[in-house]
Image (cartoon, rainbow, N blue to C red):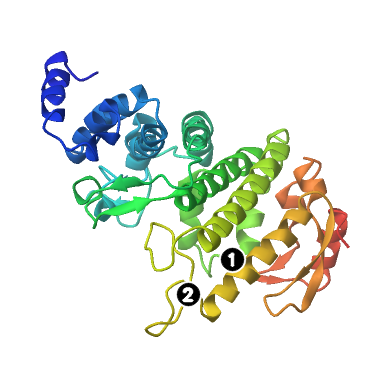
Amino acid sequence: MKPSSFTRWLFLMVLTLIPQAIRASSFDVVVGRFYLAQSNLPFAYTAFANASDPEGKVLKGLTSLALIQRETNTVNLLNKLHYTSPTNIWQVQTVGYQESPTRPTPYRTVSGTRGAQLVSILRDTHLPVLAQAETDLAVFTDNSQLVPLGRSETGNPDINLDRGDILMIRSLLACGRFLVKIANSQNIDVVVNDYLLLDEEPGPVTIEKVLSRFPDLAKLANSADLPFARNEAKNAINLYKQASEWIRSSRPLGVVRLFNLPGSFGVNSGEVYTASLADEAKFRAKLDEYAALLDGSSAITGFDNGPLDTFNGKPFFDGSISVRALLPSFRKNKIRQGDVTDALAKAGGM
């Protein structure tokens, strides 16, 4: 449902009274922000979708992510799990899924609830939204432009998003698409209550018991998704590195945005870029190591730079081997001796 013509006319009248600096945003963005402040996400999304400027595209993408929490199939599945979805994740204080007051004890889901239902929602509903959000946010390339978010819209103090923030959000979106592709590629079609019943059997729930009870868990289901998952992993790493570079080199010192590198403001007064920023540099080095695994064999080191082992992710991301095939055998929760080497050999790693 779109805003009425009277509402748009009213906004046009109001705009004539707004200072020129504020009116830099397009009319549709102003309308969308009005509805956002009212927590009317459908109307806000409609307005932002009509905008053609980068600010409007960013707000459209972010609002679409907020709307997905209230999508019908998502809400229905959460109800079966006896959880409630946040009404508006733009209002950050409502983020987080809450247990339903009607949740049974001992905990059981609605009969027949299974992993395949979650995967289908992620694949058919969430994945297209994540892909479109990437398209929308990718138009934001101006190093000097900011997207302001006010307290009335988020419930938190005012903050401005810059290009570093947008790049970081895009990296997280790529991570989301990666996880959906991985979930759809592997068989996780377990009846949830069958898993919950394990807790009532004698002895603890162990990895060995889960794998024994569900022999098809984590076997290949849709191997064609794995090359796409590889690409999304690469996208996530590249976008993170771009965001880090931009924040470190282009963001003014002392400025607080949505994403801030550790140590950017120092531990003590007056300190800038402390040792914790060096940890972020180590993290980027790790990402380079992990990226190399996606296409072949690569040595992996720990955060102390000591060698760990050589791994090869190519067979998995080529779709020729499943997560289940990579798993070693377990005795309760402990790996049986020698099985790590055997599992890696199956993947062509060592």
Instruction: Find numbered disc 1 in the image and state the secondary structure of the residue it sits on.
Output: loop
Q: CA distance from mark 1 to mark 2?
A: 40 Å
| Residue 82 in sight | no
Q: Quadrant of the C terminus?
A: bottom right
- Residue 192 vertical position relative to residue 13 in the rendered view, above or below: below
Given contact means CB atoms under 8 Å apart, are the residues at marks 1 and 2 in contact?
A: no
Question: Seen in the image, is 10 located left or right of residue 302?
Answer: left
Give the residue at x 62% y 67%.
283
* Viewer-nearest residue: 186 or 253: 253
Marks 1, 2: nearer the viewer: 2
**Other-residue count near label 1 (Cα within 10 Å), few / some / many at <14 / 14–19 / ≥20:** some
State the image coordinates of residue 174 (x, y, percent, origin top left): 57, 44
- What x and y, as percent, mark residue 276? 53, 77
Q: For numbered disc 2, what is the local secondary structure?
A: loop
In-image side of 341 versus 330 (left or right): right
Q: Which residue is mark 1?
A: 206
- Rendered image quadrant of residue 311: bottom right
Q: Amino acid at mark 1?
A: Thr
Can you say which quadrant of the picture contains the N terminus?
top left
**Residue at which label 2 appears:** 263
